Amino acid sequence: MSNERRVGTVSRGIRCPIFREGDDLAQMVVDSVLAAADSDDGFDVRDRDIVCITESVVARCQGNYASVDDIAADVRAKLGGGTVGVIWPILSRNRFAICLRGISMGAEKVVLMLSYPSDEVGNALLTMDQIDESGVNPYRDVLTEEKYRELFGENKHQFTGVDYVSYYGDLIKAAGAEAEIIFANHAEEILNYTNNVINCDIHTRARTKRILREKGANVYGMDEILNAPVNGSGYNENYGLLGSNKATENTVKLFPREAQHIVDDIQSKMLEKTGKCVEVMIYGDGAFKDPVGKIWELADPVVSPFYTAGLEGTPNELKLKYLADNDFANLSGEELREAISKAIADKPQESLVGNMVSEGTTPRRLTDLIGSLCDLTSGSGDKGTPVVYIQGYFDNYTTGK
């Protein structure tokens, strides 16, 4: 039997104990990986394997939680407790509903401004066909809730079955605040209702804040709510409420903070135990788009907030199809294989960006690509694999020959 390696990248979900606040996460991850390696389904640990840990267990072990009362207190202190404009949140019971409840508890009135026809990550309030049929121009027109209902009636989310307009409006009122809902796609519109604003967009937040602050608004991004402890709460100094998830009806789990030492510690422990230098990263949402619902998965502010140094950068790969169809179109069999292997061995170490031979390879950061693979591997339900172990990611066609 040939000793030649026939398998490239492998992604394994690693079953782990249930993590709790105060647990020694680094040691538990190392123990879980090594137990899996020694099991009947085992594997050999190799240099440049990748150990990936979902952000949720990191935050849980840190005890990085906050209550709706903590959110309300911070909102009241920063925005005055009167009328607050809440603009461009995503449509999510898990990601935003508890945050909205806390915000509403810290205000007398909430003017909720929704983007349309969809939110930032692709959750649709309306279809483009509905927009076309109505004659509404989403780049210009501002709709009241009354006008929205007149034109479009009730619209339930394709996957969740929730009418988010009603759901968010009822949630604000249940928290004790007056609710007004409008639909607009230019940030300045909110200033016709209030000068105190929380912008809830994720990846466009810096621009939105700049636009509103230039108009004199008192504006805070979601990343600036709970960016420091409130009454002993959890917090995230870089991302605030961004990246948070519902924990209970009254609490959110925040994005993990100050965790570089965890990935470095896992790398060190694995080297000590196995003699192999693995890479380590913490990951959240992957960055990919659903082809049916058009939902872009990335509701976290970044895919990976913490990772070891070997995961910095982007892939530097040749497109084998291009080589086979162009440079070596007249070759086949072993001759073609040897020519491609030589081309890979001779490729420059500097970036191939702009070189035709790399066109069609994925020009994304390694942590974004690997995090997306991890998110798809671990899932978000009951798989029980909050750690993902990846092998062969840095291999190429010549590895192991």
Image (tube, rainbow, N blue to C red):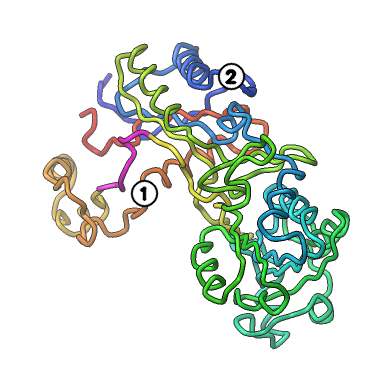
> 6 or 211: nearer the eye?
211
Indicate which disc residue 20 carries.
none
Q: Tell me, yes or no, whether the highlighted magenta stretch contains residue 313.
A: yes
Q: Position of residue 309 (x, y in %)?
A: 32, 35
Residue 91, compared with residue 69, is above or below; it is: below
Q: Which residues are magenta?
A: 308-316
Q: Quadrant of the C terminus?
A: top left
Q: 81 left or right of 379?
A: right
As shown in the figure, which amino acid type bears the numbered disc 1? Arg
As shown in the figure, which amino acid type bears the numbered disc 2? Asp
Residue 38, compared with residue 290, is above or below; it is: above
Magenta: main secondary structure = loop
Q: Position of residue 333 (x, y in %)?
A: 18, 43
Q: Tell me, yes or no, whether the highlighted magenta stretch contains residue 243.
A: no
Residue picked out by circle 2 = 23
Q: Residues within 10 Å of mark 2 (few under 14, many from 20)?
A: some
Q: 118 left or right of 257?
A: right
Mark 2 or mark 1: which is in front?
2
Q: Could you say which quadrant of the image residue 187 lies in?
A: bottom right
Residue 172, compared with residue 85, is above or below; it is: above
Do callouts 2 and 1 mark residues in contact (Cβ within 8 Å)? Answer: no
Q: Return the disc, 2 or 1, that comes first in the chain's sequence.
A: 2
Q: Mark 2 to mark 1: distance in Å?
A: 31 Å
Q: Position of residue 205 (x, y in %)?
A: 53, 62
Residue picked out by circle 1 = 365
What residue sits 45% from the left and 27% below the top?
A: 262
> 109 or 251: nearer the eye?
109
Q: 65 left or right of 364?
A: right
Q: Position of residue 97 (x, y in %)?
A: 74, 52
Q: Quadrant of the N terminus?
A: top left
